[in-house]
Amino acid sequence: MKAAARDADAGPARTVLVVEDEPLVRETIVCELEDAGFGVLEAETAETGLAILKQRPVSLLFTDIRLPGSMDGWDLAEAARSLDPKLPVIYATGFTAEDPRLVPQAVLLRKPYRPSAVLAVIRKLVGGQPN
C-alpha cells in the first residue's frame, strides 16, 4: 500500500486526495492536478485513503469505486463524509455492477475520462483556482 503526499505544505483549500489502485491512471490524474497547482495526496486503497483523511483535511476526495481491500469507493466516501459532512466527492469508475451509492452532491465520472474534465469538475466543486 502506498500513500504519498506530493505537496506536504499545501493547505486543505488546495489539496485533493486521489484514491486509485491502477498506478498509470493514478499518476495521470495526479500529474494533471499538480500541473494545475493543486496539492495532491494519493492512496492505492480505501483503507489507506481513510487513514489519510483522519490525519489531515483535504478539499476534495477523488476515488475509484472498485478498489482492493475490504472497502470500496462507496464505503470510503461514506466514511469520509462522516468525518467531514461537506467534503466534495468525485467517484470514477469504468464498470460497476451495483447501483450507485453516491453521497449527496457528489459527481460520478465514467472511465475513460479526460483529465481536463476532472479539473473542470474539481474547480466547480471547490470553487475556482487552487491558489
Image (cartoon, rainbow, N blue to C red):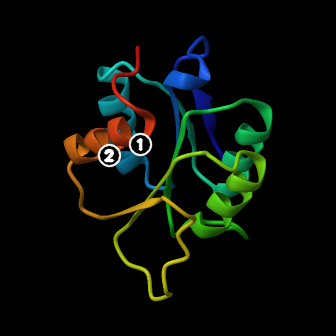
Q: Looking at this view, is 98 or 45 the one in front?
A: 98
Q: Residue at x 35, y 50 (%)?
A: 25
* Residue placed under numbered mark 2 in the picture: 121
Q: Looking at this view, is 45 or 10 the one in front?
A: 10
Image location of residue 45, percent across then percent down = 63, 55
Q: Residue at x 37, y 24 (%)?
A: 34
User: Can you say whether 46 is above or below 110 in the image?
Assistant: above
Q: Quadrant of the C terminus?
A: top left
Whether label 2 touches label 1, CB < 8 Å: yes
| 19 relative to 38 in the view: left or right | right
Q: Residue at x 32, y 46 (%)?
A: 121
* Residue placed under numbered mark 1 in the picture: 125
User: Can you say whether 68 is above or below 116 in the image?
Assistant: below
Image location of residue 23, percent across then percent down = 43, 47
User: Label 2 sits on what residue type?
Assistant: Val
Quarter holding residue 79: bottom right
User: Label 1 sits on what residue type?
Assistant: Leu
Q: Looking at this view, is 97 or 61 the one in front?
A: 61
Measure the alpha-carbon separation of dots 2 and 1.
6 Å
Disc 2 is placed on an element classified as helix
Tell me if mark 2 has few (under 14), some (14-19) or many (20+) residues whose alpha carbon lies within 10 angstroms of its own: some
